[in-house]
Amino acid sequence: AGGNGDKSIYIHRRSHCSKTDIKKAVWLFSVCSLLNPSTIYANNEVDLDEVEIYGFDYDYTLALYSNTLDTMIYNTARDFLVKHYKYPEGISKYDYIPNFATRGLHYDIQKGLLMKIDAFHYIQLGTVYRGLNPVPDEEVLELYGGTNHVPLEEVSGFYGKGPVMKQFMDVFSIPEMTLLAAANDYFNSNDIEYDPGHLYKDVSDAIGMVHIKGYMYKWIIGDETYAVLHRLASHGKKLFLITNSPFSFVDKGMKYMVGKDWRELFDIVIVQADKPHFFNSCGKPFRRLDSNGDLQWDKITSLDKGQVYKQGNLFDFLRLTGWRGSKVLYFGDHLYSDLADLMLRHGWRTGAIVPELEVETRVVNTEQYAQGLTWLQALTGLLERMQMHRDPESKKVLQDWLKEREELRAVTKNLFNPHFGSIFRTCHNPTYFSRRLCRFSDVYMASISCLLNYDLSYTFYPRRTPLQHEAPLWMDQLCTGCMKTPFLEEMAHIR
């Protein structure tokens, strides 16, 4: 549409627009072709040539799991609620719903509501659920004092948990959110009075029990973990592991993925670290485990290769190793527990593991998404210019466009998840999760296997995407992560 203020141009252009016109507009996307799910994306410039030490979390970083694990966690925790916490038998009839929840959602502990919040602390209307049922927008506004804005002090604290809201940030939280929704649904459907706060704590404890039991190693699919670790070690890089999981659990998984001599690849192994407290408190000393996994009582004066340590704290870790600053790159899946302190307080480089990227990339690569997003952007521009006209005909066109825009938003959202949409965006804003991802990670990727696509002297450059007041003059921004990235093809033999 033109910009000369003649409303007839807008009406004429809209009335003659067709799907063919939309397809022609999608030529913009062909510049980039398809996004590669193995791409590493940069929020900050990182030169791998400067990185001498690589650190890793365990769950959903070194060890990825099949989707079957979510069902197992849900079923085990649900049965634990019924058998040990004496919850109603009727909850046992609720089976796991694979595509119900997404990572990064907020849960109002006292109201028992699951919702999606954007980077500006606004609840995305249409994504608020009580149990398994959506809450009407009017009721949401009433519940939150006539607004869909949640104050800063209520959204979440630095580690994602405030007095009112809890943000679910790790991948294990998917079955936890689904179980919370199922239990809430049972109580609400049967008019049973209950305390949502008690339910939240009980479900959290039940999920934690499943992790402690150590069943999860059976669902590991980290096939390329050995290739990543071996490649780094063979190039003289120092490797370390800091995980909250117990040694027996980690040992089973690493033997399955890497082999019985997996510890030879690591310079330091730390288990049951109690992150994020490991990174922000100096209260707990390191303890050494013997070959049987039993605690030793000797004072730790060095962190030696071949040994396994428990607990400890980052301040002693830095003192004993001297590993500081941008020469250290640590990977984890939990933005708060794994990465926040390391980036903001200690100056380490951080890499976020976001398995959802693989699924979301597949959606973004579809023609339906490309066409929908192109027309959504076009409609937004038309609305922006058309709103100045106040005659009846213009108002009618404006209302039609607004309705079409809302319908198109819903279609685009459903391509990712029918209940909550993409984990990275609301209708038009970044999500709360997305904003934290940009703040706490230098780079992010679907899995550590993405490192196999890059030389260890590669530099990751963040794209200079235009600010709202800047013109989009940089054509290379269209090609971030595209299949045509030359080096990805050149490095394919490393796999």
Image (tube, rainbow, N blue to C red):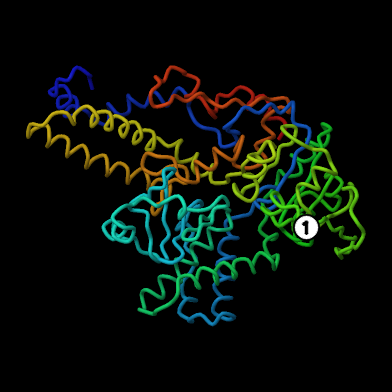
- Residue 169 image offset from top left, x and y in percent: 55, 52
In this rendering, would 441 be left or right of 137? right
Residue at 77 percent of width and 46 percent of height = 315
Q: Quadrant of residue 51?
A: top right
User: How far across and down, in percent of the image, does residue 253 sit?
Assistant: 74, 56
Measuring 43% from the left and 59% from the top, which residue is drawn there? Answer: 114
The residue that disc 1 covers is 284
For the point 37% across and 57% down, the residue is 128
Q: Which amino acid is tagged 1?
A: Lys
Q: Is residue 308 above or below residue 383?
A: below
Q: Is residue 137 above or below residue 320?
A: below
Asked whether 96 or 61 is in front, the reply is: 61
Check the image and name the residue furthest to the left: 392
Q: Residues within 10 Å of mark 1 (few under 14, many from 20)?
A: some
Of residues 3 and 10, the one drawn nearer to the viewer in this rendering: 3
Q: Position of residue 458 (x, y in %)?
A: 69, 25
- Residue 349's x, y, as percent? 68, 36
**Front position in the image: 177 or 25:** 177
Q: In which image quadrant can residue 85 be found?
A: bottom right
Q: In screen coordinates, is 138 left or right of 304?
A: left
In the image, 4: left or right of 370?
left
Q: Residue at x 23, y 22 (%)?
A: 1
Image height check: is 245 above or below 7?
below
